[in-house]
Image: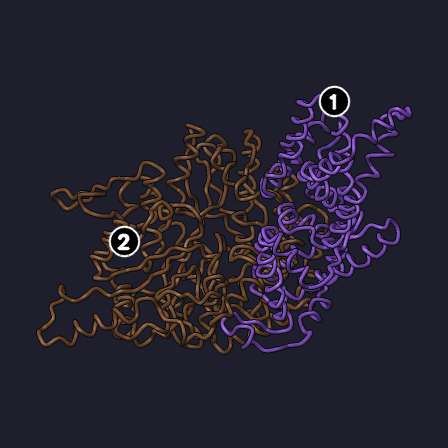
Amino acid sequence: MGLSLVLAAGLMTGCAGSNPEEQKPANEQNSGEGNGKANNGGTPAEEAAKEPTKFSFLLPTTVSSGYHTRIPDLNKDKWVLKLEALTNTDLDVKVMEDAKYGVMFASNDIPDVVGSIGGPGSKSMSGSVESGVFMPLDDLLKEHAPNLMSAVPKAAWETVSYEGQIYGIPEFLKSPSRRATYIRTDLLEKTGLKPPTTVDEFLEVLRAFKKLGVETPYQMRENFKYADIVLGAYDVLPYKDQFELVDGQVVPKFFDAENMQKALQVYKTMYDEGLIPKEFATISSTDFTKSIEAGKPGMWSQNASGLPGYRTTVKAAVPEAAVDIIPSPKGPEGKGGYFLYSPVVRTFYINSNVDKDRAIEIVKFFDWMISEEAERFFSVGIEGDTYTLDAGGAISYKFPATKEEQEEESWRSGTMWAVHDATYNRLRLALNEDGKATLEAFDNVLSQEGLPGIGFYPELNAFSKYPDLAAPQPDVGPKLIIDHMVKMIYGKEPISDWPKVIEEYKAKGGDEIIKEATERWNDKSGAVMIEHEN
Amino acid sequence: MIRMTYQFASSRHKWKFMRKYWPLYALSLPGIIYFVIFRYVPLFGSVIAFQNYNIFKGIGGSAWVGLDHFKRMFEYAEFVPILKNTILIGLYDLCFAFPVPIVLALLLNELRIMAYKRIVQTVVYMPHFLSWVIVGGIVVGVLSPSTGIVNHVLSLLGVDPIYFLGENGYIRSILVGSGIWKDSGWGTIIYLAAIAGINPDLYEAAQMDGASRLRQVSSITIPSILPTIVILFLLQIGNFLDFGFERVFVFLNPLNSENGEIIDTYVYRAGLVDRQYSYTTAIGLFKSVVGLALIVIGNKLSKKATGEGLY
């Protein structure tokens, strides 16, 4: 009851003045006039003399701490001021946790430019794109953002479209393969084995680790999150964007009962032989991180971008540790790796109340973000402050040393750098050894693995009808499926029952999901094939 | 309890009375305003349970769907097990967790050394200030089959480690038990206050009559705090289906959710994660109506049995 009351209270306030026409973006009138003057003045207006474009700009975060929380007035922050100077804008920057967007939309106080994590159909967008809160951008982009149009991959544009029109500018991933298999090379050398290339070799290495006395040969975790190496090898990942076309029907990959049973059997073997922690069903992300940082596991799965971090933290705990990324072990069909990410990390929308002149400038602002000037600014900051150039033009960057400085860097090159290829920051990574190793992993290992699939943007309607069958997060499977998988690994249900699980899924609403998915795929409406760009 | 109702000779008298004691009325205002704004006004928001609510259209613009959401709730395949879990866990909580603060308060009251009593009191109510996330972390750690102290002790006794959180059979005990650890100390405060209000003459008289400590407790202390116990019991009944979301959520995993999932955690999964405002409001409304019915029935029974009641 408490829950519903709080919810209802939030909604009530939302109703006051819910007429979208009534809301006025804060700066609309002023800047509209300003632009008009600058453009229509009798004298030939010089670029430099043009008045800066004013707009309010909302950036999403997932955390309630960090650099932006320490700055009393973000609009006077040195990085924001520099960004304004570089782009001739006058920004009113706000930062909000993604989880609080529902409240913002309910209160109807919506900034001129709203950035949000994921695509237009994401939960935090609360259906605002479908309700016409933001403007379609096709014409603006074609005319004023030629660089973006060519740089952003097609799948990313598809993801930010609704009913055939583009509604947002994506922060995109050119390479959707993000996660990698880590191994303690020093331990591997002690076993005398080669890096595992198949699932059988993978098990052999884990057994050898166990013999060496490694506490956790493979770092398992609850709900298979960052612990899905075997599911990947058999290509049965139960995720949101892991549907596939089988006999004219679009079905989830775990419908492949044969491979799913094999994968579960491998996990069961690992469980029975103590190659994964016996209590993996209650190992939270905190326990997982702590265990890795304490140097306990021999192998684990994580984002490839974490390599420099692991090299530092694991070495701090175990001085002789050597951490490397290796190609993920392959299953019988030669597949392996992890799920390919949706090509859209964040999306930036323009409020439909923004007038056309300003919308043009906003689109240009984002177009600038993929320029070289922008890359240098966001990656290494300001010359003479955070980096210097030597005579040859080589950058020497003042690497962040303290936690505060790291947060400041991540504010500049993570949060503020709205639109760009977020695969990795080549300029920044190429500056030191661990960074170069990361680049190498991306270019040589990750580009060769990962599992493509069909995803739906916006999400299937049937998902909200059957929450037990919908993936709660992009990298967590539906409750119904995960429950059975965990029980089978713990031996509480026979693995041979998997076909029954599929029947149960179908009976409890899965048939409707498959029907809608197949229709959407055939109609090409919001069904995105997520794969390597080749 | 003695009830007094003031009879005024005329409305003029009443007005005068109110003028005289105006500061008291003024003091009550913030409370009344709080309840009207934050408790009564939001009640009207419950109408969205009968709509397909869309935050951009508001209550005025959303389509009415009648009882569809209630129908969907009762048709949900897992609804019966979830309701069963909720009722069972609520019942265990009422049977095992509710009496603990009373016993604890009686025990604390018998302590003679003041300093010791204070220390014990503080220690037992400290856990109340920890959030459920932290309590969850502690309990998961303590019960861990590889590193937990409970299993360490069991292994010394020659028992194989038990994965307590991985068994359907233990989850309800863990839920109720962790609640007792966290909140029973806090619950004693109200009983201790009630005990402090008992007239010491009664004890003195009893001692003269040669009553033992135990006899004093059973014949004076318990009857004196009975009204408090009854009122708290009735309030607890009203919250019967509101076991709480967080305290269950932190312990749930695929191995124990069969016995552990309650309405609140289902609402979280189906609604807040998935923006189903109307559906979850319908479930909330269902819970509230059940709570109201229980409180009315409980109050009637209690009035008949003990003469005590909420209203």
Q: Chain of mark 1?
A: B
Which SS class for mark 1?
loop
Kind of residue indicated by mark 2: Val
Which chain did the image draw in purple? B
Mark 1–mark 2 CB contact (< 8 Å): no
Question: In percent of the image, x 83 and y 31: which residue is there?
Answer: B202
Q: Which mark is residue B112?
A: 1
Quadrant showing the C terminus of chain B: bottom right
Please state which of residues A480 and A7 is positioned toward the viewer in this rendering.
A7
Name the residue beneath numbered marker 2. Answer: A80
Q: Alpha-carbon distance for marks 1 and 2?
A: 65 Å
Chain A painted colour = brown
The picture quadrant where one finds residue A172 is bottom left
Question: In percent of the image, x 68 and y 59: which residue is there?
Answer: B13
- Whether residue B205 is situated above or below residue B184 in the rendered picture: above
Does residue A100 show up? yes
Q: Which percent across, then down, holds residue B285?
A: 68, 64
